[in-house]
Image (tube, grey):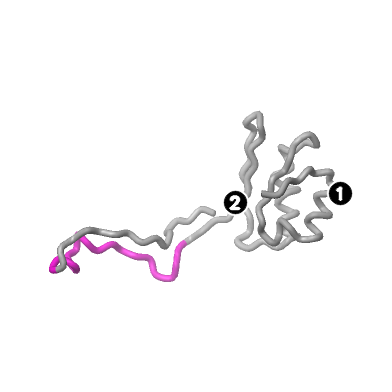
């Protein structure tokens, strides 16, 4: 996931009486930031592909991302490694991968 305005803390060393001076205060973005969900693949020969996904994925959307983007570089001799996300491990996704003869290893 790529975040434009990440919600991370920044610590500054300062004297107690300097707490509200302008140089010690950072601007913040109200109501969170902007994020993009991406799925990618890297093969042993260096071939890469990166696909933008919807902000939330269910099993059917994940299968769509696989078929439209990631399987462009996939061959039957390759191995697919997936995470533990629900859409990766669902019954219908595992059936989809088995039907496509995708060799899957768990992380």
Label 2 crowd bin: few (<14), some (14–19), many (20+), radius 10 Å: some
In this rendering, would 28 be left or right of 70? left
Estimate how packed mark 1 is, as few (under 14), some (14 to 19) or many (20 or more) residues with alpha carbons within 10 Å: few
Q: What residue is at 66 percent from the left and 52 percent from the top?
A: 83
In the picture of the structure, the residue carrying the numbered disc 2 is: 38
Please say if 30 is above or below 3: below
Instruction: Answer with left or right where residue 3 lies relative to residue 51.
Output: left
Considering depth in this image, is 83 or 75 the residue closer to the camera? 83
- Which residue occupies 80% across, 37% down? 76
- Element type where label 1 sits in the image: helix
Q: Is residue 19 magenta?
A: yes
Give the quarter of the image for residue 11: bottom left
Check the image and name the residue furthest to the top.
45
Task: Pick whichever of labels 2 and 1 is earlier in the sequence.
Answer: 2
Tag on residue 99?
A: 1
Question: Considering the image in quadrants, where does the N terminus appear?
Answer: bottom right
Q: Which residues are magenta?
A: 17-33
Secondary structure mainly formed by the magenta segment: loop
Is 14 part of what is drawn in magenta? no
């Amino acid at each position: 996931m790529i975040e434009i305005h990440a919600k991370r803390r920044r610590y500054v060393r300062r004297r107690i009486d300097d707490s509200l001076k302008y140089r010690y205060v950072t601007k913040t973005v109200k109501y969170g930031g902007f994020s993009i969900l991406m799925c990618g693949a890297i093969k042993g020969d260096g071939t890469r592909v990166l696909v933008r996904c919807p902000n939330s994925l269910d099993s059917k959307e994940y299968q769509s991302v696989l078929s439209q983007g990631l399987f462009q570089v996939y061959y039957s001799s390759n191995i697919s490694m997936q995470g533990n996300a629900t859409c990766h491990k669902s019954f219908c996704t595992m059936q989809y991968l088995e039907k496509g003869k995708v060799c899957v290893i768990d992380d």
